[in-house]
Image (spheres, grey):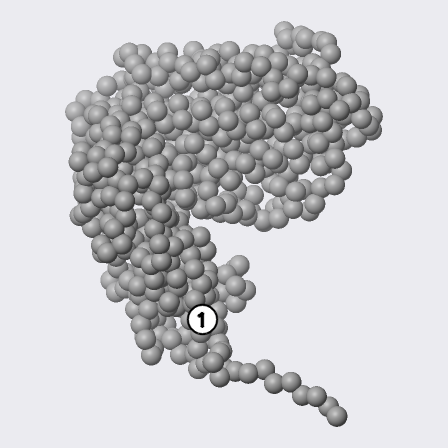
Amino acid sequence: MFPLFLLRWTKSIPIFIVLICSAFFSLYSQAQNADTYNADVLVKYHDFALKLIRVTPGFTPPVASRALGYIGLGSYESIVQGIPTYQTADGVLLGLGPNAITDPVGTDYHYPTVANNALVYLVDSLFANMSTANRTALYNLRDSLNTVYQSQTTPTKYSNSVTWGGAIGVDVFNYSKTDGGHKGYTTNFPASYTPPTGLGLWEPTPVAFQPIPLQPYWGNNRPFVAADNTTEVPTALPVPFSDVVGSPFYNYAKQVYDVGNALTTEQNNIALYWADGGGTVTPPGHSVSMLTQQIVANNNNLTFATLAYAKLDMAMTDAFINCWKTKYTYNLLRPVTYIQDYINPTWLPSIATPPFPEFTSGHSTQSGAFAAVMESLYGPAYSFTDNTNGTNFGGSRSFANFDAAAAEAAVSRLYGGIHYEFSNDKGVDVGNNIGNNINELFATQLRTSATADVSLQMAISQSQANVGGQVVVSVYLVNDGMTALDNVQIQVNLADSLQFVSATPELGTYNTSTGIWTIPHIDAGVAVVELQLLATIIGDGIPTSTAEVIAMTGTDADSTPNNQNVAEDDQATICMSVPVVMCNINVTLDAPAGYTEYQWYKSTDNGLTYQPYATTQSVTITEVGYYTVGVNGAILGSCGDQLCCPLIVEQNCCPAPKCVTIGFVKH
């Protein structure tokens, strides 16, 4: 089912590596559907947009979120013709059409070319105040991609794609001009606005004391989904304002004060890591950066990237509209104001308080939306590492799932001293609702047919353990489609070196003899059910477990049960590292044949950093360390054309049963 490495010494250990991407796409480079292309064009334009957000005047978080939303929509409209299970958003989104998006003429398009020429117009227009140097760089990006794409298709298809892409860019930008936020980078602090005054209301905050708060009218902008601007606005503050010592509100403020006065190094790093202030990609850009890292690491194709960017980008837009509507509904004062008025007149937070009202937290709201969207894309058990800030603020940060990342982003505002805890908590909750509204939009209104969409995810309780230990292998079944499914059967294959102990299915039954998990019924709309398998580790190497949907009553949108096609999302794998312990280390590792480039890496610091080790198909290992390999230019740390778990080699020349600690007593 999966290509594997064989390790040769006194025994063999299979190491699984999913090598589907480059080979799979090369076989079908002439097909019409978007899933035959890589995601390069969307990755490059999103990266360029984040660069512009950093350096272009006026791109505050709300303004940045809006630009990203329309870039996501432009990506979707330029490629959706090549995604058979989805349709245009024309006539579906709030205020869009019908007949607002230019219809394609025929189906003969090169979708990366369409996207390239749509997005260059959109980025050029949405960032109209970018520098001359950046505009030149933008046009150079377009031209370099067009040169590549022109060589990949026929003259007629290329010309049609350029023309249609340009038309889509114009259409989406015209739609954007009617939402209330057009040229928002010029209206961040409108002189026409007078902040309300009164007990408990927002006041200008130190150290800048900006008299007019940021984008006070932003909550009136048109969202993509109507519910995101209406039904999800909180109906009341979680606790009423009070200046009485010991009141709930006072205690929340005192919590900010106490935490700020006793920050650990880790808490301070978290506050700084998620600050995302001026000169950075901003909070919505940080979320998009995390998505891009996963798309690149997983070698996701153009279809996946189109849906992923569109969902997340649009969720960011709606999250900031909702949050800003809430902020200027309640106009609540910031912690620094309360603390200086009622607790300590000289206190300052560890990061500067941004100039706008308190409730709800913008970063928390958009992080909640991020988590909901990302879980719909990668599943609830997906662990990842974020490298948005490089080595700054303590370096990259790793998370067990997307909810964990959202929770840390939210609590960072408490650590930074700029939000009460209730603003963070409520923000995440509202953001989750907004993200799920976007998920629902794509699952029910933008799909072309009423189908289910099943996907599998797997997780393991420990990424590294020794022989004799126990681990929990989790399998998650997600139905992100429009219809329910019945009689779903999932074949779960535990690694040979994992000995089954017990099973705990959240729904249905698990047959311990066959390894088949049977689920009688699973609802539509991002329904998730879990199976947990407890196992004992009985062998070393890289135990890799797999799961695949082998039968169901119903039709899946993008996969076929029991076809062993690793490119489909109804299959999943999970691995772990169990150290190989030897006395005289001599291990030969063979990577699969047939690839043009091999890169082996070695780590001598327990996997913290890796250095290039060899570039041959086979290597012989004679030293302790962590080892991994990638093929065809795989990015270190990815899990596509590379080992997902390292091989760990340790040395021990004293077998446990024969080693006895002897003590000497001197007389």
Residue drawn at 51 percent across, 47 percent down = 398
Residue drawn at 33 percent across, 33 percent down = 527
Residue drawn at 42 percent across, 16 percent down = 227
Q: Is residue 266 above or below residue 463?
A: above
Q: Is residue 281 left or right of residue 349?
A: left
Instruction: Report the label total.
Output: 1
Along the viewing direction, whichever of 117 and 78 lies nearer the viewer? 78
Packing grade of label 1 (10 A; few <14, some 14-19, many >=20) is many
For the N terminus, the image quarter is bottom left
Instruction: Specify the amino acid type for callout 1.
Output: Val
Along the viewing direction, whichever of 224 and 337 lies nearer the viewer? 337
Q: Which residue is mark 1?
A: 649
* Picture coordinates of residue 446, whole percent (x, y): 28, 23
Along the viewing direction, whichever of 608 and 412 lies nearer the viewer? 412
Residue drawn at 70 percent across, 45 percent down = 264
Quadrant location of residue 599? bottom left
Along the viewing direction, whichever of 102 and 253 lies nearer the viewer? 253
Q: Is residue 56 left or right of residue 667?
A: left
Q: Is residue 410 above or below residue 640?
A: above
* Picture coordinates of residue 408, whole percent (x, y): 56, 38
Q: Is residue 428 left or right of residue 511?
A: right
Q: Outermost residue toward the right?
A: 345
For the C terminus, the image quarter is bottom right
* Picture coordinates of residue 459, whole percent (x, y): 39, 49
Q: Is residue 108 left or right of residue 523?
A: left
Q: Is residue 138 visible?
A: no
Q: Is residue 397 above or below residue 132?
A: below
* Picture coordinates of residue 279, whole percent (x, y): 60, 33
Q: Is residue 4 visible?
A: yes
Label 1 sits on a secondary structure element that is strand
